Amino acid sequence: MKSYRNILIIRTDRIGDVVLTTSILQPLRQCFPKSRISMLVSPVTFDLVNGHKDIDEVFVDDRADLHKGLAGFLRLIKEIKRKDFDVAIIFHTKKRTNALCYFAGIPRRIGYRNNKFGFLLTDSLTDQRHLGEKHETQYCLEVVQYLAGKKVLLGENKIMINSQAEQWAENLFKENKIDATRKIIAIHLGASDPAKCWPQENFIEVITQLQKKYPAVILLIGAQNTSN
């Protein structure tokens, strides 16, 4: 298995995608224990992975401010280039991320062949995620196995929770008279795309089965437009 000194993981899409990708951090670290592993995310997901024991550094692609427009993109390229990565794993394969890794001079660029900028990758993988035949974590694991050249086991999904978030949760529980000493199960009802949303009856069935199996408090969470 080839060794890498400096590995960059790119996952600049949504919260759920980043959370699911944390399951490959442990096996990636086990495969490359001496490597420096960094992650590039969007501002909204920075706190989820910052401080993770298997990540050495987290970068942000701030497209709304610092990295906005061409000047901002060039700034981001310089930031990444200075870190001298020797391989990039691009889970969120877009024109921007492909071009970023190419112009930052990262020698090996692994990603999905799903856009016109796929030629900027050195290793373009067939993207079958839209088929929904496997869980997203399994697709992510396959990329790690491709890089490592061997089968590895999936790790646990783990996110970071800072003291500010803990205090917010404590206040929420108190305001709504939720017993924090009980097991709490949160069910997120919404999705970024209506096509990804489950039918209401499916949620009802899951909640019914959870109530039968666990003596837990079940919370329904989501955006304002899912409150009804």
Image (tube, rainbow, N blue to C red):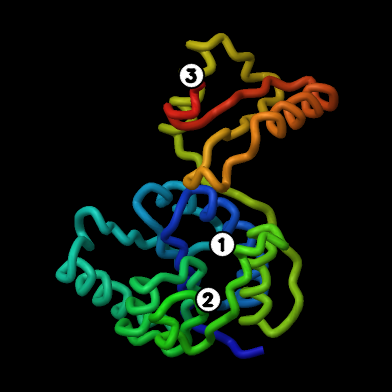
Tell me if residue 221 comes above or below residue 28 in the rendering: above
Query: Callout 1: few (<14), some (14-19), or many (20+) C-alpha neighbours within 10 Å?
Result: some
**Mark number, residue 54:** 1
Query: Sequence order check: which comes first, mark 3 or mark 2?
Result: 2
Q: Is residue 184 visible?
A: yes
Query: Callout 2: few (<14), some (14-19), or many (20+) C-alpha neighbours within 10 Å?
Result: many
Residue with the most extreme right position: 213
Q: Type of residue at label 2?
A: Tyr
In this view, the residue in front, 172 or 15, is: 15
User: What residue lies at 37% left-to-right and 55% top-to-bottom?
Assistant: 42
**Mark 2 highlights which residue?**
112
Query: Callout 3: few (<14), some (14-19), or many (20+) C-alpha neighbours within 10 Å?
Result: few
Looking at the image, residue 149 sits to the left or right of residue 63; the answer is right
User: What residue lies at 34% left-to-right and 87% top-to-bottom?
Assistant: 105
Q: Is residue 83 visible?
A: no
In this view, the residue in front, 204 or 184, is: 204
Which of the two discs, 1 and 3, sits closer to the camera? 3
User: What residue lies at 84% left-to-right and 23% top-to-bottom?
Assistant: 212
Q: What SS does tag 1 mark?
A: loop
Query: Sequence order check: which comes first, mark 2 or mark 1?
Result: 1
Looking at the image, residue 77 sits to the left or right of residue 117; the answer is left
Q: Quadrant of the N terminus?
A: bottom right
**Mark 3 highlights which residue?**
172
User: What residue lies at 46% left-to-right and 62% top-to-bottom?
Assistant: 11
Q: CA distance from mark 2 to mark 1?
A: 24 Å
Query: Sequence order check: which comes first, mark 1 or mark 3?
Result: 1
Q: What SS does tag 2 mark?
A: strand
Looking at the picture, how far across and down is residue 161, in whole percent?
50, 40
Q: CA distance from mark 1 to mark 3?
A: 30 Å
Q: Type of residue at label 1?
A: Asp
**Mark number, residue 115:** none
